[in-house]
Each structure stands twice: as structure tokens, then as C-alpha cells.
Image (spheres, rainbow, N blue to C red):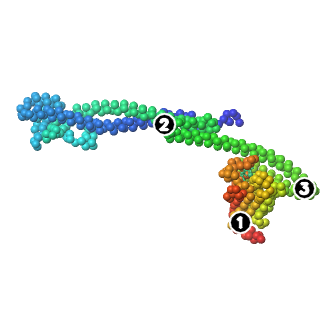
Amino acid sequence: MTATQQKPDQSRMLPHAGRRLPVLKRLSGKLLRLTLLFGLLAEVMIFVPTMADMRMRWLSDRLNTVAAASVVLAASDAKDVPQSVQDDVLLATGTKAIALREKGASRLLAVSEMPSKVDRHVDITVTDPITVIRDAFDTLINGGNRVIRVYGPIGDTGKVIELLTSDKPLRNAMLRYARNVALISLFISTITAGLVFLAISRLLIRPIQRMSANMLAFAQSPDDPLRIITPEEREDELGIAQRELADMQRQLQRTLSEQKHLADLGLAVSKINHDMRNILASAQLMSDHLANTSDPAIQRFVPKLVRTIDRAINYSQTVLAYGGTQEAPPQRRRVKLRTLVSDVEEMLNLDAKSGIEFNNHVPESFEIDADPDQFFRIILNLCRNSVQAMTGDTRGDASVIKRLTITAGQIGTTSIIGVEDTGPGLPPKARENLFTAFKGAARSGGTGLGLAIVHELVRAHGGTIELRDSEGAGASFEIRIPDQPISLAEWRSRRDSMP
Ligand SMILES: Nc1ncnc2c1ncn2[C@@H]1O[C@H](COP(=O)(O)OP(=O)(O)OP(=O)(O)O)[C@@H](O)[C@H]1O
Ligand SMILES: [Mg+2]
């Protein structure tokens, strides 16, 4: 493999890494546009009623001025008011005609040239907002060339003053006002949007950008402790998120280093296994030679030796052939459990000095549907644990009973096997990490693999294993292995062969 091949292609692993987002797509760009938009929206919502109000004030001012002038005009008989005076009043008040209504009678105070038609009538006392806003829009959109009649009461006098005027000056005033308000609104919303943006950017966007940059950097090199985010001293949700992220990154690094450790260990085990198989093969050859010697003492132990070496070779081979860290699927057969347990007893080689009593209580005829080699390993691991616990427990006190008992029974098609000892029972660490590889070891020299292997093998048989409550009163494991489903013919032949 070349140097370039060895280096992982980071950009392919992380599609977003190193890519800078266009300004408009960035969170800050979106936020700026939205604040500006909402600012303008708020100004428009204020602008509409303000504009309607301005129109009403304009009309009301005009009406008040006309009312003041009408006092002078009404003082004399209209016929006596010279036309030139009337024209002056009309010009000064910007109206076309002025009338006064009193006690049901209307009196024309000044007129120069009566318009042929009146386009709109405005009652100055109407303040209903919908009507006022609608009329304001009407003036802005359709006005400019119309004659309007405006009327309203003069204080509490009971008189009503009326005027006819063109709506052009009103509309022009409204347009000027609208332009000014729009400019001021734009200015205010720009300033507000800018301030809101700066505040949110400092409070939210920068920390979020920092977190996302950190995530990308961490993803590129998750085993680098320097890439763990340093959380800010803040109590809000972002502070919590940063602290959680830092915890997650630390946890991930721990898991990664554990996995790397396990992978290294797996490779080491494979290597050991590989060469162990070769060494065992030589031992097998030698034991074959031993079998040919005539010494009866040697003849007695040679078959056990051969069987033990065979088992070891077999196991080495399946591990290598199957690869990985998982066990090979069980090759299930009908197995005489009592014999298998006896083999385990022999393997344990318990002498009188150990003081351990081994009770094989499995009935002679008891059969179990299991992989013989795997089930041998299950019982051996459990028994070896018991022996180790009882040997290390008493410091040579001969009065303490050390008993290891194997029992077996059947419920329906499920075999129940018990492995029970009178040792000290499982320490808390072992119980808390029961069946978890490498974690439950609580004795010196233990690797914490035995029970995990047992668990995996039992599960591979579709069975269960549990530790019965054993605190301080020895350890007691119960294994349940269901028989494999069998054909009716096989069931009949088994039933017939039963004693
Ligand atoms: N019968 C038992 N009595 C008391 N403690 C036990 C018994 N069986 C297991 N333990 C405790 O459980 C721990 C885990 O057992 P396990 O067989 O998984 O690992 P180990 O015996 O420490 O190492 P190894 O991988 O060599 O078997 C042991 O270290 C031991 O403390
Ligand atoms: Mg063990």
C-alpha cells in the first residue's frame, strides 16, 4: 500500500468538512434578513393607522379653521357679505363652499362656484378604525381629483359646519407624510435589525458556529484529545449543549481507545492461537508415541492426554477458521452430560490437598442436546472459577467445606444444569459486570473473560444462564438449554430407546 493510499480521504469521509457556506445560506445571513423583514412589518403595522389618523387630523383642522371663519360670516346676513370677501375666505381656507346648519336649516355662508357633484362625504365624528383606514387608502389610491364634503359639529353649540373642498391638497399632504414615515421606518428598522442581529449573533450564532466547527474538526480526528470542545462558562441551553458535547466526545474517545485495545488484543490472540496450534500438533504427535509404550502407568493417563490435546487443537482450529471474535455456531449432538462432567473433573485434576469435593450429580442417563466441545468449555469455565474461588478463599483452613456440585434435570424439552459451590460467592464487581468481557475480573490474575465466554456459548445454544442469588453463600449458576426442535420420527426413536 502506498503512502497516499494509507491516508484516509477526509473530504470523502466528511462531505461538509472544509466547505464554507454562501453568505445567504449562513444562519447569520438568514437571521439578518428575517430581522429586517420583521422590523419593516412592524413599521407597516404602525404606519397604516398613523396615516389614517393623520388624514382625520388634517380634515378636522380644516373644519375648525372654517368654523372660526364661519362665525364672522354668520354674524351678518349672507346676502350682505360681498362676493370678494367670500372669495377671500374660501381661498384662505382652501374650500369651495361653506355652509352652516342650525336648528334643521342649512345656510350657505360662502360659495364661489358650486361644484356639479360631490364625490365623498366625510363625517368628522366617525372614528371607527376600519372605516377611517379604508377611507385613508381610498384617498391615497383614488383621490387627487375629487370633491369632498366634510362636516362636523362646532363644539357644543349644536351647530354643524360643512365645507366642500378638493381632496388634492389632502392627498399631497398624505403622500408627503407617507414618504417621511417610510424613510424613518426604514432607518429605525435597519438600526433595530442591526442591533438585534449583533446581539443574537454574539449570544447564539457565534457559539453555534464554534460548536459546528468543533464537530467537524473532531470528526476528522476523533482520537485527538485536543479536539474536544472547551465549554464556555454559561448557564443557558448552549452552555448545556457544549458541556454535553464535550462529555460525548470524551466518551467516544474512551470507546474508541477501548475498541482499538480490543482489536489489538484480537490480533494478538489470533497470532498466539495460530502458533499454539502448531505447538499442540507436536504435542499430539508425542502423545501418540507415548500411547505405544507398554508402561501401564503411562497407558492410564495417555488417553486423557490425547483427548485434552485433541480438544485444544480442535478449538484452535475453529477459532482460526471462523475468525473474528465470535464463536463458531454450535454443532449440536446428543451428549451424555455425566461423562462430559467427568472429563471436566479430570481436567481440573483436583487432588486431596485441594480439599475440594467434586460432586457429579448428573444422572447416568441424562442427555443434553449441545455442541460437546462448547458445552465442555461452559462447564469447565464455571468449575474452574469455583475451584479458584474456593482455593483462594480459606487460606488453608481445613474446617471450611469446599464442595462443587453439578446437577442436571429436565423440564419438558429444556435441560437445566446447575453448577454450585460453597465458596465466598461473587464479589460485587463481578456481579455488577456479570458476563461482560474484561470488566468482571475481581481476582488477581483473572482476565474477566471466562463468564463472558460461557454466556456467549449458552446463548448460541438458544439458552440462558443466570446467577442465582448467591451473596455470601457460595456461587450458584443455572443454565437452561432448550433441545433443538426434532422430527416426529426422531422423537419416537428416542422415546423407544429410553430405558
Ligand atoms: N464461583 C465463583 N465464586 C466466586 N467468585 C467468582 C466465581 N465465578 C466467578 N467469580 C468472580 O467473577 C470474576 C469473573 O469471572 P470470569 O471467569 O469471567 O473471569 P476470571 O475468572 O477473573 O478470568 P478468566 O478469564 O481467566 O476466567 C472472577 O474474577 C471472580 O472474582
Ligand atoms: Mg474464570
Q: CA distance from mark 3 to mark 1?
A: 39 Å
How far from the left and from the top, in percent, is residue 478?
Answer: 70, 60
At label 2, the amino acid type is Leu
Q: CA distance from mark 2 to mark 3?
A: 82 Å
Helix, strand or loop at label 2? It is helix
On the image, numbered disc 1 is attached to which residue? 410
Tell me the quarter of the picture where residue 66 sits.
top left
On the image, numbered disc 2 is attached to which residue? 204
Crowding near the residue tagged with mark 3, few <14, some 14–19, many ≥20 C-alpha atoms within 10 Å:
few
Tell me if label 2 and label 1 are in contact, CB under 8 Å: no
Helix, strand or loop at label 3? It is helix
Point out which mark residue 298 bears.
Answer: 3
Query: Where does the N terminus fall, quadrant-wise?
Result: top right
Looking at the image, residue 411 sits to the left or right of residue 11; the answer is right
Along the polypeptide, which appears first: circle 3 or circle 1?
3
Number of marks in the rendered image: 3
How far from the left and from the top, in percent, is residue 235?
Answer: 51, 39
